Amino acid sequence: MRDGENPCVVSVDAGGEFAGGNRLLSAAHCDREAAEELAGSIADLLEELHQSQYALWQREAELAASVPVTPHPDEQTHLAERLENVLKAGAQAVGCQASAVYMLDEATRKLKLRACWGLPRSRFAEPPRPLRGAAADLEALIGNAVIVREAERLPNWQIPEEFHSAVCVPISSPTTPLGTLWTFCDHGRDFSVGETNTIEIVAGRIAADLERAVLLNQTLQLRSLARQLTHAAQWQQHRLPRIKPLLPHWDLAGWTAQSGALGGDFHDWFVLFGGNLAVAVGDAQGKMFESGLTTATLHTALRAHAAYGHPAQQVAERVNETLWTASVGDQFASLFYATIQPETGAIDYVSAGHVYAAVVGDSLRTLAPTDTLPLGTQPDSEYPAVSDQLERGEMLVAVSEGVHRALRGTRERVLWRMFQSHRGLEADELIRKTRMFLDRHACERSAEDQTILVVKRLATP
């Protein structure tokens, strides 16, 4: 079709000519460029169809592999019976009287009888055979089928049972030799290629059954681990504070999100025996399980030492000593801990490691320094307390290192300005706005555990 021409519907009449619009065109007058363009489009469609079929072929295989493995209530009994039945069927198919499976140990030095048919079960109580010197087994393990026609004339092949002839083939996964399959006959004979292939098929079936059993055990273990992980995550989440203390003219809110099921962040608040308000943000270092265990130790130690009414510095140093003595020197954590007098707004706080805090009002006063050692680094670290004042209408905001890393630089300054411009909102609303800000601007939202704590001293007395 040339540029500027109107498209037309092409059909064929009874006389073999093409009709387009109100005129008839013969095949000789068909536009060659239009035909080439049509042919190219058809070729593209066929290529897309071929790619779609290929992708469907791959996807169906993936879906077949995703079928869940469901255990039978008597799976162990069924495995033993299934192996014995497979050995029986294979041996009888080639005219043999016994068959046995010998599996390698973890050190690949010995072969142990694991399944058999036609042999007394007392054989299972016998010690494993050494692989060294077992010529037939060694030859089979490198991938060759070994046929021993007359055992008494070939003693070097070391048939494991007293039979006149036997076949030994490997049992293996696609990448690893697992053991050998022996099929025994009570008289001297040869084995045809078809019979040898039958025994190798039996060995493949046994390998598949064993791999399925391994997969099933792993699946059950993973399911159990997943349930335990879910319970641990719920336990960790339930330790976060839910009920705000009944303190007039104060408003608190906090939010903690772990990057995995377990994490190392937490926030907390509680009223001490003398009436002061205690608030904290903790951040344990390490991978998921390691940080989860460390933060449980940190949180418990903080609650225990703070309950005795110790000053902030003493609480931090006692928690540091607890982390140090309860580990082998590989549990580190950051902590911001502050005690607040509700009547006056006076604050005593300590900061260890990488937790960022500031008093937000008409101006922004940074509280937590960034050059202190994390808890658990060394037993005699000192964490001096610093005093400040939270005036009416001001609020204390503390964030974990995950928030700091997710924003990085300019975006973090925008976050603190947002706290300033919206400090008249309730603490819960400020947390909601902060989470929305993180969702929009964080560069590594899911890579770090994140915690935000807001403590407001209301402007109205």
Image (cartoon, rainbow, N blue to C red):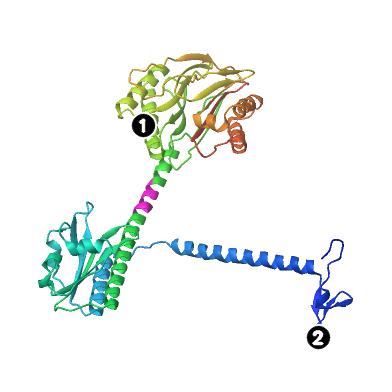
Circle 1 is placed at which residue position? 297
Q: Residue at x 42, y 61 (%)?
A: 68
Q: Could you tell whether 57 is left or right of 105 in the image?
A: right
Q: Could you tell whether 212 is left or right of 260 in the image?
A: left
* Amino acid, disc 1: Thr
- Is 211 located above or below residue 362 in the figure? below
Q: Could you tell whether 144 is left or right of 62 in the image?
A: left
* Residue 418, picture quadrant: top right
Q: Residue at x 55, y 62 (%)?
A: 55
Q: Position of residue 262 (x, y in %)?
A: 43, 40
* Residue 383, picture quadrant: top left
User: Marks 1 and 2, how far apart in space?
Assistant: 90 Å
Residue 309 showing in the rendered view: no
Q: How many marks?
A: 2
Residue 295 showing in the rendered view: yes
Q: Position of residue 92 (x, y in %)?
A: 23, 79
Q: Secondary structure at mark 1?
A: helix
Quadrant of the snapshot with the N terminus: bottom right
Q: Which residue lies most toward the bottom here?
A: 14
* Amino acid, disc 2: Ala
Q: Residue at x 44, y 19 (%)?
A: 372
CA neighbours of label 1 inside 10 A, class few (<14), some (14 to 19), many (20+): some
Q: Nearer the viewer, residue 175 or 235?
A: 175
Circle 2 is placed at which residue position? 14
Q: Is residue 204 magenta?
A: no
Q: Which residues are magenta?
A: 221-228
Q: Could you tell whether 327 is left or right of 189 in the image?
A: right
* Residue 236, picture quadrant: top left
Q: Nearer the viewer, residue 211 or 220?
A: 211
